[in-house]
Structures are given as C-alpha cells and as structure tokens.
Image (spheres, rainbow, N blue to C red):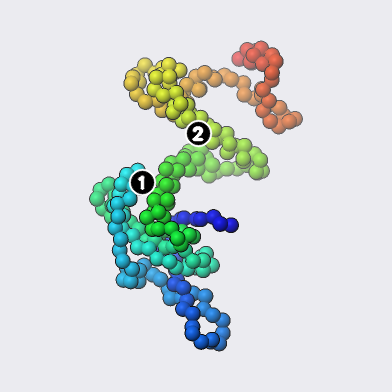
Amino acid sequence: MGAVVIGQARRDSALYLQPVTPHKKQRGRPRKYGEKLTFQEVQQHYSLQQKNLKAYGKVRCFQFYSAVAQVRFLKGYLCKIVWSRFLDDRGRWTKWHLLISTDTNLSAQHIIQTYALRWWTEPMFNELKNIFGLINAWEQTRQVLARWTMILSLAYCLPRLLSLWLGPKKGAELFTIPWRINQPVTAGWMADAITHYFYGFPVRNLWARKLRKLILPKKHFYDQLDQAV
C-alpha cells in the first residue's frame, strides 16, 4: 500500500542476505533466502558507525551497524536493518537494539531518529492502558468500547490543553490554590478546577434512553438543572 513501517524487532530475528543468482540454470526451485545474517557476522563484515544524534530528549552518542536483508517473519521482505545502541545519562552503553525499516532507501540515522519519536507517546499509552483501565476493557460491542475510549481520551486531553492554553496567570485566576505561588499550571490543577465548577452537575439527565445519546435541551435547561441540584 506504499506505507513505510519502522519498528523494533527481537535481536534473534531470522535475517538473510539476498540469494545469489546462478549463472546457469539448475534443477529445482530457486533459493528464496541467501546466507543467514547474524549479529556476530554483521560485526565482522560491516563497519561500525558512531554519530551524535538528537533523540530521546537530547543529543546522544549512537553506535550502529546498517545492512539490507530479508526478514523471515515478513515472508522474506527486503528491509533496511539497523543495530544501534547509545550512551545513557550515566555514561554507559545500552544493549543493542534491532530496528527494521521497510524502506531500504532510508539512512540509518533517519531510522534511529524516527523510531525515537515514539518515546514521547509512551507515557500517554501507559496511562490509557494501566491508569484508565483500557487493558481491562469489558465492553461487548465496538460502539460502547469506542464511546468509552473517546470519553477517556477527552478526560486525558482536556486538562492538558486547558493548562497550555490558559497559562500560569489565567490558570491561577480560574482556580486559585493558596499554597501554590508562582508555580506552572499543570493538568492536575485544571482537573481540580473542572471538578470544582461542575460539582453536582446532573449528567445523567442529559442521556436520552430511546435515542441512546446525550442531548442538551435548548429551553428550560437551567430550570431543570436547579431542580436537580
């Protein structure tokens, strides 16, 4: 479909070089895979490169090998293979990681930096999966699961967007916390403010059982709200 995929695979993944085409025709089917490419052979026959790349929040020193090989679990698809490691904040080398790109024209540096972008999304996936309980989704239909996921995503994004949009001055005016002076407005601060302003809001009264959706009445809504509260 023309999509480019970059991902991390197991270090013991089966990788093969392209088979050598024989000069003369031979009996039987042609070979699908060439010689097996292990990490030890890569260290012997390929040159080690070292460069400073901006990844994982700062400029880091990377060492990497790159090659083009066929990937067994992708049914022999020809990919760009990159083994890489970097110096962590303690000055120690990390373990070697195997990165695979379905586009063989990409450089090893571009593959490493592109894969490092997923580092920014990991906290969000961790919160959605473990804190919001998406790992224990019990809904039986796709519609209910999609609605619940949308509600959780809005609950995750709205306080963060409000904290960025309001800033420290307007955020402090919206909901003051006496013991927090000259502090940045955080998402937790905005969540407390939303809870304070909408405490006792009758959300269930907006649910139409027959239509199975939320409806905001245009008239007499505030009268019903006062009676419910």
- Residue 18's tag is none
Which mark is first along the chain, 1 or 2?
1
Residue at the (67%, 16%) spot, across then down: 221
Residue 72 in the image: state x and y as whole percent. 49, 68
Looking at the image, which is closer to me, 221 or 203? 221
Residue 37 in the image: state x and y as whole percent. 40, 71
Mark 2 crowdedness (10 Å alpha carbons): few <14, some 14-19, many ≥20: some
Q: Amino acid at mark 2?
A: Tyr
Residue at the (58%, 57%) spot, across then down: 1
Residue 50 position (above or below residue 219): below
Residue of label 2: 156
Q: Amino acid at mark 1?
A: Tyr
Q: Is residue 126 visible?
A: no
Q: Quadrant of the C terminus?
A: top right
111 relative to 225 in the view: left or right? left
Considering the numbered disc 2 on the image, is that residue within a helix, a strand or a loop?
A: helix
Q: Quadrant of residue 108?
A: bottom left
Considering the numbered disc 1 on the image, is that residue within a helix, a strand or a loop?
A: loop
Residue 194 in the image: state x and y as whole percent. 50, 22
Residue of label 1: 56
Determine the CA span between mark 2 and mark 1. 23 Å
Residue 47 in the image: state x and y as whole percent. 31, 66
Which numbered mark, 2 or 1, is in the foreground of this view? 1
Q: Quadrant of residue 220?
A: top right
Tag 2–tag 1 contact (CB < 8 Å):
no
Residue at the (49%, 85%) spot, across then down: 23
Residue 98 position (above or below residue 22): above
63 relative to 205 in the view: left or right? left
